[in-house]
Image (cartoon, grey):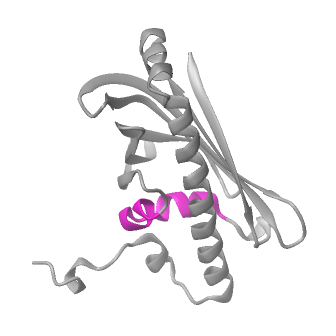
Amino acid sequence: MSITRTGRAHLDVPCTDIDLTAWIFGLSDAEYQACARGHRAAGVFADEEGRGTVNVEAIGGNLVIQHYRAVRTERDGVEMHSAASRVYLLHLVPVTATVGWWLAAAPTGAATSELTCTVEVGLHPVVQALGRLMALGTFLRRHVEEETQLFAADIERKTRRTRTGSVTTSSISSGPDPRRSGAS
């Protein structure tokens, strides 16, 4: 059994200029955190099995840790799958879930596009019944709607800067320089 939620957002850039693969694997921890109130941390990795991301988020009072593997990576669409996400119900009780995450860009005009973000959480039937009691579907819908809007804003901003040549690849893929933050 699974819970699926989808968000959509308008982009004022042509779909042909968007590269979702570069965006998702260039997203810094700080940029990820800025894309939803519940986003806690993110990182990117590559190993002999391919590329992936680790995302930590709080949704509806539950902590979720996903170890996504890239299933499909194209300029206009990315599919990620986490076969063994850890969900800490009320931040206390650990359960395992599968999580699928799809991002797709589609043209809506010559210079406009639509971003679609879909998240599917697979839970054991007993845990899913508990999730219904805890309004997990409602909290997941709110979270996906929020992150979709903020993902779109980040994608649009980076796409525009890349088109004008004012951003280098390293500035897209790296976060703030910790040496400049005053932290020791």
Q: Quadrant of residue 154?
A: bottom right
Task: Judge by depth and name the residue closer to the eye, 71 or 84.
Answer: 84
Q: Going 51% across and 83% down the picture, which residue do you hit?
A: 168
Main SS, magenta region, reads helix
Evaluate whether residue 149 shows in this view.
yes
- Image quarter of the N terminus: top right
Left/right placement of residue 23 relative to residue 68 reads right
In the picture as drawn, the residue positioned furthest to the left comes out as 184
Q: How many marks?
A: 0
- Between residue 15 and residue 60, name the one nearer to us: 60
Give the residue displayed 34% in from the left and 30% down from the top.
86
Provide residue 169's location: percent of width, then percent of height.
Answer: 50, 77
Image spot of residue 180 (x, y percent): 23, 86
Residue 4 percent coordinates (x, y):
61, 31
Q: Which residues are magenta?
A: 19-34
Of all residues, the one furthest to the top in this rendering is: 126
Residue 137 is drawn in which quadrant?
top right
Q: Is residue 49 visible?
A: no
Residue 115 located left or right of residue 148: right
Residue under the point 62% across and 59% down: 149
Residue 67 located left or right of residue 121: left
Above or below, 6 against 145 in this view is above
Residue positioned most to the right: 109
Find out whether residue 10 is within the magenta segment: no
Quarter of the picture holding the C terminus: bottom left
At 58% from the left and 40% from the top, the residue drawn is 141
Say whether residue 166 is left or right of residue 84: right
Q: In the rendering, at what x and y percent does residue 130 appear?
A: 43, 17
Q: Is residue 25 magenta?
A: yes
In this view, 129 is above or below 166: above
